[in-house]
């Protein structure tokens, strides 16, 4: 009988190895690779007349692995969360800059048509708001550089 995890018994190698914060990334990659293999096995079986009980067993195994991984990430921290807190701001800044460029193009096209209607005014207002957000994010990130 395996060790009990929060979501049930640990499966496979998890019975024999201890998950720590330092090996969490490797554990996650291993579990994800194992789940991918099981999904491929299910797909192969469904295309080639595999038994339903085998596919159900593989699906249960995937659920157990996902539960183990969820428990381990909660207890030891997700490898994805081990990034700089500024990372999200950098991503947000890139999205806002892309949005700013797109809106610039839309406004320029509208002015070429000499048609400034309600929607165009709304776009211009959103554009101004996005410009100020980009400036704020840029200033925030430059503080840490």
Image: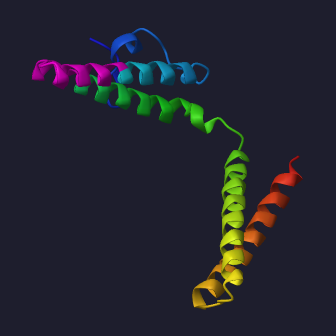
Q: On the rendered image, what quadrant is the N terminus found in? A: top left
Residue 42 shown in magenta: yes
Left or right: 120, with 17 as reference point: right
Q: How is the image coloured?
A: rainbow
Residue drawn at (81%, 58%) of the image: 138
Answer whether residue 40 is magenta in the image: yes
Magenta part, dominant SS: helix
Q: Residue furthest front?
A: 113
Q: Is residue 79 above or below residue 105?
A: above
Query: Image check: 20 left or right of 60?
Result: right
Residue 95 in which image quadrant: bottom right
> Given the current orientation, which residue lies at the most extreme top position?
16
Q: Position of residue 109 (x, y in %)?
A: 67, 76
Pick the residue in front: 29 or 120: 120
Q: How many marks?
A: 0
Q: Position of residue 23 (x, y in %)?
A: 57, 19
Determine the residue positioned at 31% across, 13% down.
Answer: 2
Magenta span covers which residues?
37-58
Do we see residue 125 in this rendering?
A: no
* Position of residue 142 in the picture relative to residue 28 (left or right): right
Identity of the residue drawn at 72% across and 56% down: 93
Q: Position of residue 25 (x, y in %)?
A: 56, 24
- Eyeballing the image, is 128 above or below 100? below
Q: In terms of image quadrants, where is residue 116?
A: bottom right
- Is residue 63 among the parts visible in the rendering? yes
Q: Position of residue 85 (x, y in %)?
A: 70, 45
Position above or below: 6 against 51: below
Query: Considering depth in this image, is 7 or 131 the residue closer to the camera?
Result: 131
- Given residues 75 and 13, the one toward you in this image is 13
């Amino acid at each position: 009988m395996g060790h009990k995890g929060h979501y049930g018994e640990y499966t496979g190698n998890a019975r024999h190895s201890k998950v720590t914060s330092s090996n969490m990334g490797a554990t996650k990659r291993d579990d994800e690779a194992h789940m991918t293999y099981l999904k491929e096995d299910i797909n192969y079986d469904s295309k080639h007349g595999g038994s339903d009980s085998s596919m159900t067993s593989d699906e249960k195994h995937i659920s157990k692995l996902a539960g183990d991984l969820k428990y381990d990430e909660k207890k030891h921290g997700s490898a994805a969360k081990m990034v700089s807190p500024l990372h999200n701001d950098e991503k947000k800044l890139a999205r806002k800059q892309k949005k700013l460029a797109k809106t610039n193009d839309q406004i320029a096209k509208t002015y070429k048509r000499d048609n400034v209607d309600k929607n165009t005014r709304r776009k211009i207002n959103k554009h101004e708001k996005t410009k100020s957000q980009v400036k704020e994010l840029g200033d925030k990130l430059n503080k840490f550089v």
